[in-house]
Amino acid sequence: MTGNWRIRVVHTTGYQYEGPVVQSYNEARLTPRSDRWQNLVVGRIETSPPTRSYRYTDYWGTEVTSFDLHAPHTELKIVASSVVETGSVVEPVDGASWPDLKADAVVDRYAEYLEWTRYVPKHTELTRLAASLRKGRKPFEAVLAIAETVHDRLTYQRGTTGVHSSAVDAWAAREGVCQDYAHITLAMLRSIGVPARYVSGYLYPKPDGRIGETIRGESHAWIEAWTGGWWGFDPTNDIEIGPRHIWVAIGRDYADVSPLKGTYSGGAASAIEVTVDVTRLA
């Protein structure tokens, strides 16, 4: 799995309301970023009914499309379309020792990626396990060992956890989805002093996908760790980050990267449609 890919992603979300909504304010974190690993060729977000929107980059470096709608409506549809050129496999960074990670300059610079959050709380059992995996390993080796351990000890299972479940909830169940795998890995890495952050995006499901083939995919999550430089790993699938990964947002945990959030006044809402179609173009 080497070399560059070109992938199109169409992420559609539809909501239906029990009664007319007259004021709706929303933020979408659905636009892939350009960096040294990938290049955004085109990205747009369209809504039905049409809305006024503007874009900005949030504190974590994620592109946000903010839009509001004041005309009465009973349905809202958001379609995010993008074409991204992805890079080759991301290699681990062996650029920091354990004393380096304890240096005041590093701890201060990456303090937010070392702190505990509601989704990534301090947990005695996870801390103990992480400490045992740290022994005799360099920081980057410990990252790999922890990610692989999380992959091995959890069963991928929908429905056991929800969007509000923490790393502790998922660890207690020993089941979860990609969000849970990422949160548990982050809890373990932060407990041993490795700055680590949550990454949201997409994964093209088939390693041998044919050019022109469209597959029903889904949002995905993985982690990045700082061991002298940032690099990522996918604990859900126990694989490196490569051409099939498309990253959209980063933050401390899921709360910082939620694809859609907002407020509105009106009837209760239900999501009637959430689809992600991914096509390998080259």
Image (cartoon, rainbow, N blue to C red):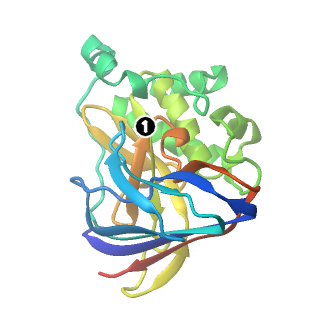
User: Which residue does the image show at 35% across and 36% down from the upper left?
Assistant: 59
Q: Which residue is mark 1?
A: 197
Horizontal side, residue 237 vs residue 8: left or right: right
Nearer to the camera, 262 or 159 = 262
- Residue 108: x, y in percent? 31, 17
- Residue 48: x, y in percent? 53, 72
User: Which residue does the image show at 21% across and 53% down from the upper left?
Assistant: 36
- Tell me the kind of residue under disc 1: Arg
Residue 80 in sight in this render: yes
Horizontal side, residue 239 vs residue 120: left or right: left
Q: Can you say which quadrant of the picture contains the C terminus?
A: bottom left
Residue 136 in sight in this render: no
> On screen, 107 above or below 42?
above
Nearer to the camera, 26 or 87 = 26
User: Which residue does the image show at 54% across and 30% down from the upper left?
Assistant: 187
Disc 1 is placed on an element classified as: strand
Nearer to the camera, 53 or 192 = 53
- Residue 221: x, y in percent? 50, 52
Horizontal side, residue 187 vs residue 109: left or right: right
Q: In the orientation shown, which residue stands out farthest toward the top? A: 104
Query: Residue 45's quadrant in the figure?
Result: bottom left
> On screen, 213 above or below 237?
below
